[in-house]
């Protein structure tokens, strides 16, 4: 069985509007995930949509002193984790998500030569 996810890349203005509409927060955020979990066929499932703010990713990459691609991999992983049921409302949930995100980033770095520059 395979799963599908839609990705949307956006900028601060659009993400600010989306974040306000969905969560009531008038600020951009790096990623918002919309779980849908719809069976497309016996072999395919649509997990949902992930919206990524490219501007916020760039700011976070600079803030955390990592490359843009590394930070993008982290937020995409974070979004996918939300689609499959992970939550980050508690410290335990945050740690669990961070562990998986770190693993994904490590795999991406090893497979594509992503650097911290």
Image: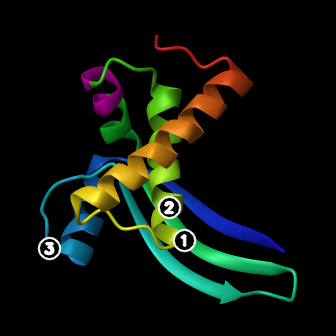
Query: Is residue 32 a member of the stretch shown in magenta?
Result: no
Left or right: where 89 falls relative to 103 = left
Q: Residue at x 41, y 41 (%)?
A: 54
Q: Earlier in the sequence, mark 1 or mark 3?
A: 3
| Residue 85 higher or lower than 79, as above or below | below
Instruction: State which region is magenta.
Output: 59-63
Answer with the quarter of the image where residue 36 lies.
bottom right
Residue highlighted by disc 1: 84
Q: Position of residue 44 (x, y in %)?
A: 81, 79
**Residue that label 2 marks:** 81
**What distance separates the C-alpha of mark 1 from that of mark 2?**
5 Å
Picture coordinates of residue 96 (x, y %)?
A: 40, 54
Query: Could you say whether the residue bearing mark 1 is in a helix, strand or loop?
Result: loop
Judge depth for marks 2 and 3 and give the one in front: 2
Front residue (pair 87, 63): 87
Q: Main secondary structure of the magenta part?
A: helix
What residue do we see at 67% from left, 78% from top? 46
Q: Residue at x 87, y 88 (%)?
A: 42
Whether residue 74 is visible to the viewer of this picture, yes or no, is yes
What residue does disc 3 label? 24
> How far separated are the C-alphas under marks 1 and 3?
24 Å
Q: Residue at x 40, y 20 (%)?
A: 66
Q: Position of residue 109 (x, y in %)?
A: 62, 24
Residues at marks 1 and 2 touching, judged by CB atoms closer than 8 Å: yes
Query: Residue 21, image x and y in percent?
Result: 23, 76
Is residue 100 rendered to the left or right of residue 46? left
Q: Is residue 21 above or below residue 57?
A: below
């Amino acid at each position: 069985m395979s799963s599908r996810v839609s990705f949307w890349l956006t900028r601060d203005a659009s993400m600010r509007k989306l974040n306000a509409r969905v969560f009531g927060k008038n600020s951009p955020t790096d990623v918002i995930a919309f779980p849908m979990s719809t069976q497309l066929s016996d072999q395919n499932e649509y997990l949902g949509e992930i919206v990524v703010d490219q501007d916020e990713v760039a700011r976070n990459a600079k803030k955390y002193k990592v490359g843009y691609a590394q930070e993008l991999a982290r937020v995409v992983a974070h979004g996918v984790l939300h689609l499959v049921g992970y939550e980050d409302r508690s410290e335990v949930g945050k740690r669990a998500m961070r562990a998986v995100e770190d693993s994904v980033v490590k795999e991406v770095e090893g497979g594509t030569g992503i650097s911290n520059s």
